[in-house]
Amino acid sequence: MSSETFRAPAASNQTNVFAVHGADPEVLAFAMAKYSRSALSMRESLTEISAQRAEQFLNTFYFQYGHRSIADLAHIAFAVERLSLLAAIVLVDEQRWDGQERSTRYQNFLKSGWYLPDFGEDSGSVQLYSHTVENLFAAYQRTTAAVLELLRGRIPCPDSLKLEAYERTLKARAFDVARYLLPLATNTSLGQIVSARTLETQVSRLLSSPVAEVRDLGNKLREAATGSAWNVNGHAAAAFADKITAADPSLAAETVQLLTREVRTAPTLVKYAQPNDYEIQSRAELSQAAAEILSALPIAAAPLVDLVERTETLEVELAATLLYSASHHPYRQIRDLVSGFRGSQVSEIIELGLRHRGKHDEALRAFHAGADLRFDILMDIGGFRDMHRHRRCTQIVQQFTAIHGYETPNSGDLAGDADVLAEAGIVADYQTAVEAAHKASAQIAAGQTSEAAHSALYLLPLATRIRSLFKMDFAEAQYICELRSAPAGHFSYRRVAWEMFQALQRQHPTLAAHIRVTDFTRPIDLLQR
């Protein structure tokens, strides 16, 4: 034992808080990680750390030792422009994701353009695909104009509202109706800010997709993270460096290095991201199992929202959720079927979801089980995109398909028993365009190439129904019901939020009494935003 005199630490009440700006994401992650390994302050750490040292540290602790939490400390902003709505839905399907996408309410998507898959030598499919997309956009334009004219006739501009604001608000309401006609091929743009850990998972998942555009998107994200980032002040910094160099050539090298240096946001943490074999192999085996188990079971009719009460064991829930993710059946129907299986059969299904799991793979999302509230929702893709943004719950999303039919918007938030499409004189035009798109999608899907079925999905308009299972606690259900039922929202998800509330009210009336929901059935002021 040391003979050195023990000295107790001194008291200190001087908390120090400061924001950090200007450090590269991986360097900042290294500096923050050093709090667990060094007594240096953040200023001291960042002063002594170089990009090279950060790379060496991350190669050791992130890749060799698997300390993945380090990558949570490096956050990167991306702009993703001119990707299809289909690819955007897949891209944002992360539980740890922050971002914003172009709004179908505030922007006219006629200016967006659309994605054309590679059909090779199949000129017939190219022609049918292009004609169908153009037909949907033409119907979108006609619907926007007709509904806007209807709203102008029914809702006068109040004296208290400027004409510009009045027109903008009514146009947004018209877009709310017309967006049902936008095909999944429609181009959009989005911005995202994610941690390097989420980015690595996202890139790997995208690279594992059977859809060519989505795989290409994964490659581009990885290249953007590991390559040179765009500097918003780059031109100004270069011009200033030229001025300093002209005034004093001896400062040239130092000035250029400081002001115009290349920045790579995640040159280390994402460079090894590859397709996820666990996901690819599990998807194939689960799809085969679902096809065999459910082939003789017709898809049962289901309501817009089904709050599936908990009657099954956790094992049955896991097996049912795995089959649900690879099918188009309602969760209740699959749950009731699996509940009658022997324990060994249930275990076999669960084993399919874990058989190919690698050393560093997180279990499939279906294993996020045990939540008391499970809402099985069958709604239009457009409304689903809004519900999809809720991250404080587990979402099991089935694949796009035309098998569930499509939604026809009714009141469009007009009061009473109004039928916005009928009053605008375009209901037949709307239905013809959607049904023609579904027919063309089926025709292309029957093609000879392996990519045909995936390419055909781009023709599905946002009116097409999609099924998804939302698992959550009461706090999240309360939040969704209150937020999404508010008058300023889109009538599609306002209806879903109201149905969620009513389901909660039937099963948990005491708890539902604490939800500040807006009654979807009551008229609202369309000029209220």
Image (spheres, rainbow, N blue to C red):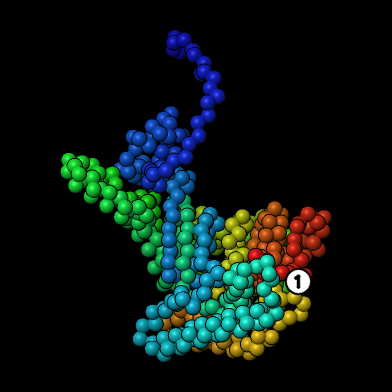
Q: Position of residue 366 (x, y in %)?
A: 59, 60
Q: Disc 1 designates what residue?
A: 523
Residue neighbourhood size for the residue with mark 1, other residues' Cα within 10 Å, grouped as few (<14), some (14–19), many (≥20): few
- Counting every numbered tag in the picture gives 1
* Residue at screen point 48% across, 36% down: 18
* Residue at screen point 78% across, 57% down: 512
The three-letter amino acid code for the residue at tag 1 is: Pro
Q: Is residue 97 left or right of residue 263?
A: right
Q: Position of residue 3 (x, y in %)?
A: 44, 9
The correct choice, above or below, for 360 with respect to 417 in the image is above
Q: Look at the numbered disc 1 and give the secondary structure of its residue.
A: loop
In the picture, residue 206 is in which quadrant?
bottom left
* Residue at screen point 46% across, 74% down: 112
In the picture, residue 163 is in which quadrant?
bottom right
- Using the image as rendered, state which of residue 274 and residue 182 is in the foreground: 182
Work out which quarter of the rendered image holds the N terminus and state it: top left
- Using the image as rendered, state which of residue 347 and residue 437 is in the foreground: 437
Q: Quick check: can you spot residue 141?
A: yes
The correct choice, above or below, for 229 with respect to 108 in the image is above
